Image (tube, grey):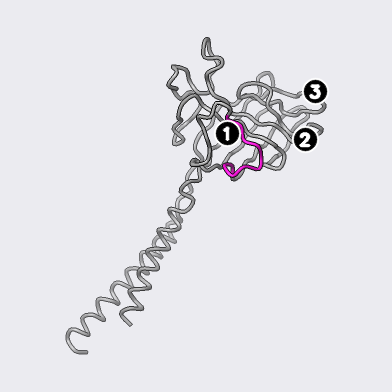
Amino acid sequence: MKKIVNFLFLAVIVSIGTITTSSAASITLDIEWEGENSTATATGFITFDDSLLEISNPQGGFYLPSSAIFDFGITVLDDTFGNGTFGLSDFNGITFNSPSSLNFGTELIGQSLSNGCAFGVLTGNCFNSIGEFNLSTANRDGNTPTGIFYFTLASHGTNNAYGDALTVKSIKPASVVPLPSSLVLFGLGLAGMCFNRTKKLVLRQNIGF
């Protein structure tokens, strides 16, 4: 009986640890675009494996599907023609590169780079040295947004007649979804019950009950 109780106690601890640390290599970033000359906006996200994403690769391009990219989505709003929600299947490539390492735990746009420039900031001599985040569409005959300039999308591309220009304004870590407090309390409570049960069994064995 003691062995069974100890096993349950260990199982609870392991299960809690598994829930809180799963997908350790997975990073999700939220992205926001704003229209350069319109009220159009876009919001999106990218989930990738930081151990596979070659952020310092000068080419920085990933043909889709890619083992480095788990998921991607973008929603365009208030555009003249290209409103809609799009996912990985709508694109054939994602460009994501930087002249130096980035801190994925905070806002990426504006981060200082080793070359003296800032990631995603088009200024002066840094014009060609700010890295890149962009998309290439697999469907030029639809409303899928596509890259047209550094950190800039056309809201839609139909026969190369591009829509509103949408520029990346923010790339930041997605909000961390905490483990539900009720689940944590349940796990700790169950662990405590198992521990107390074990203590009672040991006491009974020691005093001959």
Q: Are marks 3 and 1 in contact (CB under 8 Å)?
A: no
Q: Amino acid at mark 3?
A: Ala
Name the N-terminal-most of marks 2 and 3: 2
- Residue 187: give x, y in percent of width and height: 39, 65
Left or right: residue 64 compared with residue 114: right
Q: Which residue is mark 3?
A: 161
Q: Earlier in the sequence, mark 2 or mark 1?
A: 1
Eye-nearest disc, 3 or 1: 3
Is 88 drawn above or below residue 20 in the view shown? above
3 in relation to 83, above or below: below
Q: Which residue appears farthest toward the top when viewing the image?
A: 124
Residue wearing tag 2: 139
Where is residue 24 drawn, in percent x and y? 46, 48
What separation in Å lies between label 2 and label 3 (alpha carbons)?
13 Å
Looking at the image, is 63 positioned above or below residue 5?
above
Query: Which stretch is magenta?
Result: 60-69
Spot occupied by residue 149 in the image (x, y as percentages of width and height): 65, 21
Task: Check if residue 49 falls in the magenta segment.
Answer: no
Question: Is disc 2 placed on a helix, strand or loop?
Answer: loop
The C terminus: image quadrant: bottom left
Image quadrant in which the N terminus is located = bottom left
